[in-house]
Image (cartoon, rainbow, N blue to C red):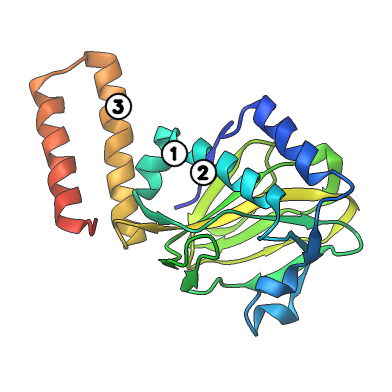
Amino acid sequence: MLLTLPALLSPEEVRHARTLLDAPDAPWVDGRVSAGAQAQHVKRNEQLAQDSAQAAELRQLILAAVQRDPLFFSATLPRKIYNPLFNRYRPEAPTYGAHIDNAVMRSHADGQWVRTDVSCTVFLADPDEYDGGELTIHDTFGVQRVKLPAGHAVLYPGTSLHSVAPVTRGARLASFFWIESMVRSDEQRRLLFELDMNLLQLRQQLGETAQTTALTGVYHNLLRMWATP
């Protein structure tokens, strides 16, 4: 399932993030330091040093945003969240070729192993600030090209082949991380999300009825059947 999360970050949060990322002393390093052996051949970007004070502050900003967002919770049903990372693409380090992320990653923040069921990219630069830089995702519905306003995010399956198109002007800034879901199957998560969203609309239109109560029970019984808390 590919899903956009509009305005995950407020304009004030985006401005604060940019203050840290654009600062002259921001510790940008070669993005290949976090890539696996195969990905190193196609990865040409920069990454904010994970052990820096800026990265620690920005991680907390991103985690606070996703924890308050009901759409994020409904779509991912998070069990664990890999510590958010931050990258930069510009003409000097412009692209990340087609790759699939590692199935399991170890978080540098807390040492936990995280299964990468769902990938998330939070855009921190507006589309008119740079040329190129589209996140290209190959899924069951074909090729999707994503380039969102600053503060918006996109969720997509961690199993997807994806890439970042070359940036030819300006700088593309983003946060990226992975979610281990309580529901491992993308198909099952999609069904639960669609049921949850339709229940929300029914409640808004009809209020609480015997039918919405019964369907809520169906949702939770399916979640009980499929979830590993």
Question: What SS does tag 1 mark?
Answer: helix
Give x and y (percent) for residue 112.
43, 66
Amino acid carrying mark 2 in the image: Leu
**Residue at mark 3 to residue at mark 2: CA–CA distance:** 25 Å
Give x and y (percent) for residue 11.
68, 26
Give the vertical position of 107 relative to 170 (above or below): below
The front one of 112 and 47 is 112
Question: What SS does tag 2 mark?
Answer: helix
Q: Which residue is mark 1?
A: 67
Query: Residue at 66% across / 72% down in the picture?
Result: 34
Badge 3 crowding class, 10 Å Cα cut-off, few under 14, some 14 to 19, many 20 or more, is some
Give x and y (percent) for residue 198.
29, 32
**From where the camera sits, is residue 112 visible?**
yes
Q: Are marks 2 and 1 in contact (CB under 8 Å)?
A: yes
Q: Identify the disc placed on residue 63.
A: 2
Q: Which residue is mark 3?
A: 200
